[in-house]
Amino acid sequence: MKLITAIIKPFKLDDVREALMDLSVTGMTVTEVKGFGRQKGQTEIYRGAEYSTNMVPKVKVEIATNDDIAERAVEAIQQAAHTGAIGDGKIFVTDIEQAVRIRTGETGAVAL
């Protein structure tokens, strides 16, 4: 099992969700986050005054998948979130040692 964590631009969330649904991904967790990478923040105008912020709004998408579709899920996220501009985001893939469905007590891949 794999945990796929993607940090993407907020306006790309619907595209990523649709791409994952096409792969029959059954669930995801979405969190609004802030951070920075190479783009080093942004400049905004508030009430006529310009100010800089070093944190850029992003969306974190987390999905747990079976090993057999993990690579396809990563490719789907990459294609759906791509704009070609700086700040498109990152995708991280980590192993899941154990998963438990609280309601039934099922464990392993069945719990996904």
Image (cartoon, rainbow, N blue to C red):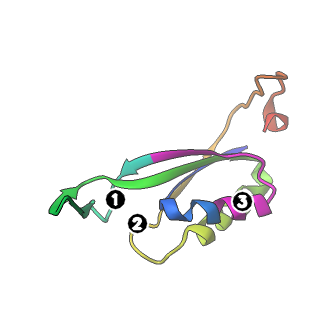
Q: In which quadrant will I find the C terminus?
A: top right
What residue is shown with label 3? 20
Sequence order check, earlier mark of 1 and 2: 1
Tag 1: amino acid: Gly
Segment colored magenta: 16-32
Q: Is residue 71 visible?
A: no
Return the residue found at the far bottom.
84
Q: Quadrant of residue 23?
A: bottom right
Q: Provide the residue designation for mark 2.
A: 87
Asked whether the viewer can see residue 76, the reply is yes
Indicate whether residue 17 is drawn in magenta.
yes
Which residue was labeled with disc 1? 37
- Check the image and report above or below for 10 versus 65: below
- Earlier in the chain: of badge 1 and badge 3, it is 3
Q: Position of residue 8 (x, y in %)?
A: 50, 59
How many discs appear? Answer: 3
| Disc 2/disc 3 C-alpha distance (Å) | 21 Å
Q: Secondary structure at mark 1?
A: loop
Image position, residue 51 (x, y; %): 17, 59
| Element type at mark 2 | loop
Position above or below: 28 against 45: above
Q: Residues within 10 Å of mark 2 (few under 14, many from 20)?
A: some
Residue reaching furthest to the left: 49
Q: Residue at x 73, y 31 (%)?
A: 99
**Pointers 1 and 3 in contact (CB under 8 A)?**
no
Identify which amino acid the numbered label 2 is placed on: Gly
Residues at circles 1 and 2 in contact by the CB criterion of under 8 Å: yes
Q: Nearer the viewer, residue 108 or 25?
A: 25
Q: Compare residues 87 and 110 and report the one nearer the observer.
A: 87
Q: Residue at x 49, y 52 (%)?
A: 59
